[in-house]
Amino acid sequence: MTELWAMPAWKIHELYEKGKTSVEEVCRTLYRRIEEVEPSVKAYIKLLPEPDGKGADGRVTGSPLGGIPYALKDNICTAGIETTCGSRILSGFVPPYDATVAAALKKAGAMLLGKTNMDEFAMGSSCETSAFYPTRNPWDLRCVPGGSSGGSAAAVAGGEAVFALGSDTGGSVRQPASFCGVVGMKPTYGRVSRYGLVAFASSLDQIGPLTRDVRDCARVLGVIAGHDPRDSTSAVAEVPDYERGLLEGRKDDLRGMRIGVPKEYFAQGIQAGVKHAVMEAIKTIQELGAFVEECSLPHTEYAMAAYYLIAPAEASSNLARYDGVKYGYRSEHWSDLTGLYTKTRMEGFGPEVKRRIMLGTYALSAGYYDAFYLKAQKVRTLIRYDFAKAFERFDLLVAPTSPTVAFRIGERMDDPLTMYLSDVCTIPINLAGLPAISVPCGFSEGLPVGLQIIGKPFDEPGVLRVAYAYEQATEWHLRIPHLDGVEAAKRIARNDGQVSADE
Amino acid sequence: MSENERYEAVIGLEVHVELGTKTKIFCNCPTTFGGEPNTQVCPVCLGLPGVLPVLNEKVLRYALRAALALNCEVARFSRFDRKNYPYPDLPKNYQISQYDLPLARNGYVEVNGRRIRIKRLHLEEDAGKLLHEGDGAQDKWSLVDYNRAGVPLAEIVSEPDIRTPSEARAYLESLKAILQYIGVSDCKMEEGSLRCDTNVSVRRKGETGFGTRTELKNLNSFKAVEKSLEYEIARQISVLEDGEEVVQETRAWDESREITVPLRGKEEAHDYRYFPDPDLVPVVVDQALLDEIRKEIPELPSAKRQRFIREYGIPEYDAGVLTADKRLADFFDECASRYRDPKVVSNWLMGEYLKYANATGLSFAEIPVTPEGLVELLNLQDEGVISGKIAKTVFEEMLKTGERPSEIVKKRGLVQISDENAIYAVVDEVIASNPNVVRDYLGGKEKAFGFLVGQVMKATGGKANPAKVNAALKKRLGKE
Ligand SMILES: [Zn+2]
């Protein structure tokens, strides 16, 4: 029998209902697992001594997530629990309020285990820009888990949480899901409230679940989705019952589905192993009865450039508030106001965050605004239009989630442009505000590959349906990394100079 | 021709008005003035990580009301932008404002028959307040009070249509009256709910181009606006007359010395890096909403002024004074519609009533006298129950207590003596005790008659009916 720590939420919930396990047992198992693998994986920034939530009182059967232990990315505010965004500048910041998603999960009876590691302010694709330490990929501890929600993905993959939430600005849920062999979804922009998510790029950020399988993804999404009067950009559209939609629909039949394969996503930089796994997955979808055809999203090549103007521009403004005046880190080396600002920010932010603040400030500056920010917004419109046109012919699009599998820790840190390419297949979807999921679709070089399924705005049900049918037809999602725990970490620490042996 | 007469000034005003909604523009914190520091704050107006602004619909409605009352074109589609600049009173280090798509444009205010155009009206959030401990370079601490952060502001920018300092003041007074009329702001300059900066330049009369302008700040009263402009215009003219050039700069009004001085340190040209705030959705205003708002707008000062002149036949000057404040205008309106002679009402209000308000510093809302009370007083006088002099005494009491005049008259025994026997008794007594005066009067000194009347009034405590006293005296002295 599968260990409890390796089970999806829906299965644990079934056991609860049948009285075959208890919240105490599940928690005990999870904590034991964490104790065993966390020293090598380092998925968490903060681990709570006991889970926070109402599930522990035994009333677990009523709610679909009652008594399920989970993890939150550390850029999602939690009342009374320090929230750092993986940054020194927010050290000591304890929010007085819960993010809307955190409150929703609490209400649903889910139990918070801790806050997961991330790239500083979600700026990165490897979890290496965290001010604390890099998280390691449970499939290969020498590799990154992806980012920026790398801690959340690694926690789920490593059996350190049943599910987790991440945030996705340019691929930050899907890419680590792909690298860690779990399911990760970025919902339609506006589907999930951003209230309490520390902003990186407000027009792109969206919170999404990282889970063991598609059914859990539907279940978690159903709890966190919906209109929030505290978020002007959250959609008023009704939330369908995603999970019931999956279970009631036909899992083995995709006849009538029209699926497009954008050729631009298979172009330069894609690893052969990744391409092979994704093509095999597409074949499987075809065998399930879907109509599959190649298509084109002609402005894809401009997406990266547009993203790296829009996201830093918004970030430069969003991060202006971290100045040492009100909360978080404050430098001690200052004598006047300007000094307080510059020293605090100089000491509090890491190099990648500084790089993006500078990029964004430049893009918004007088005389450059039209050429950079405004032009990027026009490109964004063209990219949206590309998708809208494709969706006239197709119900969904499929593509790789990332052109590569997980890379080695340290490999891309000195080469930001190569690092940025990790998100080349996910960024356009954020620019267009569409829903997309990454599901495990095989392995290359012993590391997981992710298949990305992209839908029309608010067609999460369609995305989930294809993902579920594919998942039911394959067994990739059942694979579990063989972590030999602390011993492996020590070995890696000895062999790999890039990673400090700070266990 | 003096040098001042060869020049004319070009003045534009930038006015910030706090909208009087109960809660702030993007959160539910109260906007009450004068609370203990940092007691009217929440994560949103403190700009804590992760929070998001949500536009208070009431703020939009107030701003639309102002836009329509100021004859503006309301944009069907406008949006909020971020104005980026770091300062400790700004919790997010950017201010949510409106930049290239303001809520309304192209309005005007009628000021003494001239149309002063309004360039734009937009919404923004107020900043907090810095409190410095100690002084100057020795400042040890600066404290921040965020109670004001997020209070809704409407910024109203005029075109440079104003030509004189007094016209600038008149424009402000009109603006204040309109905004008070429509109930969107109390416009108290001393509490900061109305703030004003001015732009001013001078040019030779007949020229159409603009001279180099300066911006004046630290204007804490309407008087300061007027005085600072007077000073600044004279200063600019003398600079030009000396063959020098006006420097474009921001200057502060020094109230005690009554001069303008350059603000310390050259102000750097700020690049605010405006861009659309991605946390807020565009403001879309449809015709139905505008129609609804239009219905909320009451009769405005200029229309009311015209109506008072037309319906009540009072002089234009009176109408102007009475309509400058809505409460005063309503007071007059109610009295005038019930009393036979509106000009008498106007005299009372512009006289005793305003004098009392100015002397006590009380607002019209704080003065308890009612329109019904004033009308009753005037009727008592008409009916001969009290004399004009007594009426003033009674009104003084009414201003303080709000009591009805008939009550005051009864309580203090102020009813006029009209009984002829009683009056003749006093008259006879006065004649008997002032033989010399009587002789003078009979000898042709008309003035002596007034003295005798005065003596009778004095003897009756002012309560004798003056007409009857006159008649009685004349009869007794054989002049009738
Ligand atoms: Zn507030």
Image (cartoon, coloured by chain):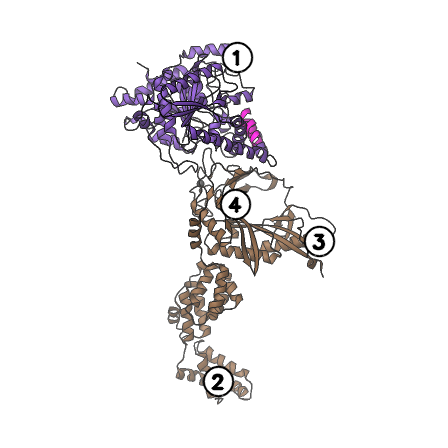
Chain colours: A purple, B brown
Query: Can you give x and y, in whole percent of width and height, for residue A460 in the image?
Result: 38, 29
Give the magenta range: A341-360
- Judging from the image, mark 3 belongs to the subunit labelled B
- Judging from the image, mark 1 belongs to the subunit labelled A
Q: Earlier in the sequence, mark 4 or mark 2?
A: 4
Q: Same chain for marks 1 and 4?
A: no
Label 1–label 4 contact, CB within 8 A: no
The crowd level at tag 4 (other Cα within 10 Å; few <14, some 14-19, many 20+) is: many
The crowd level at tag 2 (other Cα within 10 Å; few <14, some 14-19, many 20+) is: few
Judge from the rendering whether residue A313 lies leftward or rightward of residue B41; answer left or right. right
Task: Give the labeled residue for mark 2.
Answer: B433
Q: Name the quadrant containing residue B42.
A: top left
In the image, what residue type sits under mark 2? Ser
Report the image quarter containing ligand 1: top left
What is the CA distance from the residue labelled 3 to the residue labelled 1?
Answer: 75 Å
SS for callout 1: loop
Residue B102 visible within the image? yes
Query: Can you give x and y, in whole percent of width and height, for residue B197 in the image?
Result: 58, 49
Q: Could you tell me what secondary structure mostly forms the magenta stretch?
A: helix
Task: Give the labeled residue for mark 1.
Answer: A497
Query: Can you give x and y, in whole percent of width and height, for residue A336 in the image?
Result: 59, 35
Task: Give the labeled residue for mark 4.
Answer: B102
Q: Earlier in the sequence, mark 2 or mark 3?
A: 3
Looking at mark 4, is its residue's CB closer than 8 Å to ligand 1?
no
B413 or A109, nearer to the observer: A109
